[in-house]
């Protein structure tokens, strides 16, 4: 029995949900923030890039009505990287995908993903993931507030033409 038999193809277990969360936070973080966090990281492990970082294209898909048949929307540029971290206990592997042509960002995200798989997991969660997630939530809230402040409520008023028809000069045409 595979994972899809147990949870269904669109359901995720707790480990997969946590992995999606950390991958999303690392991918949505600013590259400069990740670089600063990595520079400040004490006792950096030895990092070996197994794949990339490199950029390429993926086919983006959509669903009719959000739940219907899939269709190809178009291509999107994605950067990916896979690293091995050595020196802090067990050897761990980290992988990251970042939308756009940002190979350095993908490399940094993969490094933190590798650290999440090892003994430094709780530290990465506390010092990297939670602060970045909080900053992203604040940024998103500001963006939503800015969008809400420009909302205009339009309403339709039915024009009734029961009155006299005025000509160009404003006088009654009768």
Image: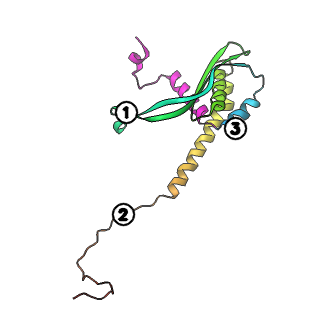
Q: Are marks 1 and 3 in contact (CB under 8 Å)?
A: no
- Tell me the number on the disc at residue 32: 3
- Image coords of residue 122 (percent x, y): 66, 24
- Visible in this render: residue 137? yes
Q: Residue at x 29, y 84 (%)?
A: 167
Q: Which residues are magenta?
A: 1-29
Circle 3: element type: helix
In the rendered image, residue 100 lying in the magenta stretch gets the answer no
CA neighbours of label 1 inside 10 A, class few (<14), some (14 to 19), many (20+): few
On the image, numbered disc 2 is attached to which residue? Answer: 155
Q: Residue at x 40, y 23 (%)?
A: 9
Q: Nearer the viewer, residue 63 or 151?
A: 63
Q: Is residue 83 above or below residue 147?
A: above
Q: Disc 2 or disc 1, which is closer to the eye? A: 1
Q: Disc 2 or disc 3, which is closer to the eye? A: 3
Quadrant of the snapshot with the C terminus: bottom left
Q: Nearer the viewer, residue 49 or 146?
A: 49
Q: Quadrant of residue 30?
A: top right
Q: Main secondary structure of the magenta part?
A: helix
- Image coords of residue 65 (percent x, y): 34, 39
Circle 2: element type: loop
| Whole-number angstrom distance, CA of label 1 to CA of label 3 | 35 Å
On the image, numbered disc 1 is attached to which residue? Answer: 71
| Whole-number angstrom distance, CA of label 2 to CA of label 3 | 45 Å
**Mark positioned earlier in the residue sequence (1 or 3):** 3
């Amino acid at each position: 029995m595979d994972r899809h038999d147990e949870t269904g193809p669109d359901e995720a277990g707790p480990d997969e949900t946590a992995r999606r969360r950390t991958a999303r936070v690392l991918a949505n973080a600013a590259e400069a923030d990740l670089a600063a966090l990595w520079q400040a990281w004490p006792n950096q492990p030895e990092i070996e890039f197994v794949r990339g970082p490199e950029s390429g294209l993926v086919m983006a898909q959509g669903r009719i009505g959000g739940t219907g048949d899939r269709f190809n929307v178009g291509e999107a540029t994605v950067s990916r990287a896979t690293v091995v971290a050595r020196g802090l206990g067990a050897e761990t592997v980290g992988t990251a995908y970042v939308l756009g042509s940002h190979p350095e960002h993908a490399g940094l995200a993969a490094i933190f993903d590798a650290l999440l798989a090892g003994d430094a997991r709780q530290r990465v969660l506390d010092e990297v993931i939670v602060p970045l997630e909080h900053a992203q939530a604040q940024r998103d809230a500001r963006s939503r507030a800015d969008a809400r402040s420009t909302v205009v409520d339009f309403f339709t008023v039915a024009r009734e033409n029961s009155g006299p028809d005025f000509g160009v000069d404003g006088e009654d045409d009768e």
